Image (cartoon, rainbow, N blue to C red):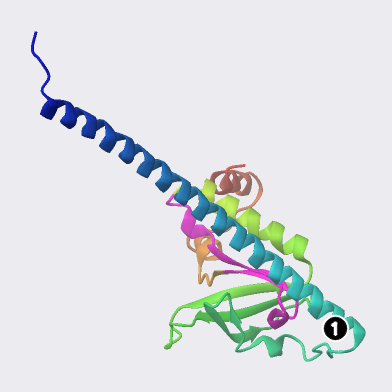
Amino acid sequence: KKEVTSFEYEIVKHSKTIGILHEEAALVKREMEEQHMLTKLETERLEALSIQTENLEYIAKVRSGEIQENIEGPSSLIDQVLNEKYIITEELNTASDKCDILVAHHISDTTKKIPFIVKLTEVREVIELEYRINQDLLDRLDPDEVDLFVKVYDWIEAKPQTQMKAGFVMECGLENLRGYIWRHGSYTGEKLRKAMETIIRI
């Protein structure tokens, strides 16, 4: 039977120690990652709470008369920056005063080549439902069908700079479904039903 020398014993001993240290280091790393994630979630929660508090304070000041509510209408939204990404550049006329339709550009788009459409309204429940339906619709479409509909992008939270109106940013579609119908002809009756089944997967 081979005898274990003191040198070999020390090597085995130190190897086990190193293994234990590696395990402890991995455990500490996991704990730090978990703590980082918890910190991130708490930061997001506090930011959301801060936005909500800011909105409530603004509404309270308007109601108390400390701040005069803006009565100039949608034109005051021009040049406002949304989500630190989009700047409103134009107001579009609409048949209803319940929803504002505006043109915006990315703040980095200095030549204003790529427009976006912004929909804002005071009726948050309705606009939020529309936003979710559009997102769900695009998720269900095949790649060759996506271009038939405009894409939706960022959600816009109601804030003082939006006159406490919520909404979302979407693609400024030039043709989409209207262009498709123009190229392939209008649909009526059974033809319309089949087309809708194909497009939106009823």
Q: Secondary structure at mark 1?
A: helix
Q: Which residues are magenta?
A: 143-169
What residue type is disc 1 on? Lys
Pinpoint residue 97: horizontal percent, then vertical percent: 79, 78
Residue 184 visible in the displayed image: no
Image quadrant of residue 127? bottom right
Residue, far front: 6
**Residue reaching furthest to the top:** 1
In screen coordinates, is 27 left or right of 157? left
Q: Nearer the viewer, residue 135 or 184?
A: 135
Residue 33: % across, % down: 45, 50
137 in the magenta segment: no
Of 62 and 148, which appears nearest the observer? 62
Q: Mark 1 highlights which residue?
A: 61
Q: Quadrant of the N terminus?
A: top left
- In percent of width and height, residue 17 lies at 28, 35
Residue 12 left/right relative to 35: left
* 190 relative to 54 in the view: left or right: left
Residue at left offset 43%, top offset 51%:
143
Name the one closer to the observer, 196 or 114.
114
Q: Is residue 150 part of the magenta span, yes or no?
A: yes
Residue visible at 59% across and 43% down in the picture: 197
Quarter occupied by residue 168: bottom right
Q: Eyeballing the image, is 25 above or below 70? A: above
Q: Is residue 98 above or below residue 20?
A: below
